[in-house]
Image (cartoon, rainbow, N blue to C red):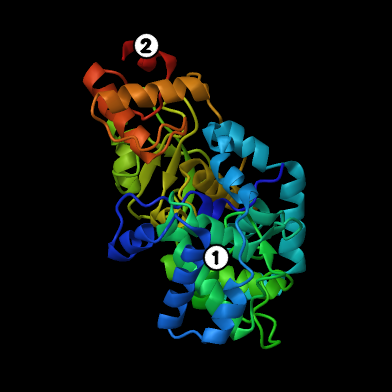
Amino acid sequence: MKLPALAAALCLATALPAAAQSASSQCGGNWQTFVQGVADEAISQGRDPQAVDRFTAQLRQDQKVLDADRRQGVFQLDFTTFARRLISGARMDKGQAMSREWDSVFDRVQAEYGVPRGVLLAFWAFETDYGAFQGDFNTANALATLAHDCRRPELFRPQLLAAIQLYEMGDFDPATTTGAWAGEIGMVQMLPGDIIENGVDGDGDGRVRLKTSVPDALMSGGKMLQHFGWRAGEPWLQEVQVPGDMDWSRSGLTTQLRPGDWQAMGVQPRSGQWQADLPASLILPQGHKGPAFLAYPNFNVYFEWNQSFTYVLTAAYFGTRLEGAPVFNPGNPDPGLSGDQMKALQRNLADRGHDVGEIDGILGAGTRAAVRAEQARLGLPVDAWPTKALLDRL
């Protein structure tokens, strides 16, 4: 199953700074007026006017990009289903083969940026199937279309301006550069602004070629994760076993306790020893009867790459698998809600004053927080997992 370009697709801002509000005010309306506004802004940032004119003259709206942006039903899947779809035996085998083939590059990434190979291998696998499927959308048109669309201009307008800068640098061709529908480029799917800030010439040819050079792609991905705050030598995720009667309200990313504190509540590593004496959060992606993990500080870095909780947890878990962890225990969770049931729940929660964001059938951070609040009010286990029983009670 091909699931590219998840990195930018869900980077949804909850509060817009002044620059984002400015981008929002410049979206929509007449296409040519919008393009001219982008050109004027690029020139005001110091770009060469002739280069800007050549770049913007080729921009066209792409309805297929908007269709893809609106079609993200895969994120309605629960963690176990999502993980099993993405983590196949073939992807495991290919990851191990790639680890051997590019062993020296992964060693360089870890030495220079502190990022373990399993972490990068997981992103490489999920984003492009190890470079095999990098997307065939015209990147300039994709970014322009999404910047013009008023759903998330605060994300895409700066990336369109960054693409103009890359073009001026000789590292982007608006006519031929292709990638994912959300504007990411290359084997690990990086946006133009991230390429400018974190692109690395890993193979020493004087250019940063993320589409064709594995060393460039892996070194750039490692540098970007370090830039996002990755801490060398620290774990990111560990599967645990939980007792049947603990205080489930202590679960979730907002609570951080050290392993000794979790151990006092009956939490234990499912295999091996505690990985580090660091603050960690107990994650129950399908409630207190399902899989359980401790998320260490490095886990939060994943949200800088992608805002989807399910994607982030799956990528983090796959990274541990590629580093030798066993297959997770799915447990026996209560059945989750269908997409329509989740939308009904979100509408119900919104009617009760909770901020769940868009009614989209996706169990995002806002919906999880609202579910926890209602579970506490109703005397149910506070584990953020919405069930038919909760929906019926509401």
Q: Is residue 89 left or right of residue 72?
A: right
Which quadrant is home to the N terminus?
top right
Question: Which one is nearer the viewer's eye here, 39 or 260?
Answer: 39
Which quadrant is home to the C terminus?
top left
Question: Which one is nearer the viewer's eye here, 394 or 41?
Answer: 41
SS at badge 1: loop
| Residue 266 coordinates in the image, percent (x, y) | 35, 33
Q: Quadrant of residue 255?
A: top left
Identify which residue is drawn at 29% across, 46% down.
257
Question: Which one is nearer the viewer's eye here, 360 or 35?
Answer: 35
**Dot 1 amino acid type:** Leu
Q: Is residue 331 left or right of residue 258?
A: right
User: What label sits on residue 191 in the rendered view?
Assistant: 1
- Identify whether 250 is placed above or below 148: above
User: What label sits on residue 392 in the rendered view?
Assistant: 2
For label 1, the crowd category at 10 Å Cα-Cα, with few meaning under 14, some 14 to 19 and many 20 or more, is many
| Residue 249 coordinates in the image, percent (x, y) | 28, 31
Which of label 2 and label 1 is nearer to you?
Answer: 1
SS at badge 2: helix
| Residue 111 coordinates in the image, percent (x, y) | 55, 76
| Residue 61 coordinates in the image, percent (x, y) | 60, 56
Question: Marks 2/1: CA distance?
Answer: 43 Å
Identify which residue is drawn at 66% across, 42% down.
86
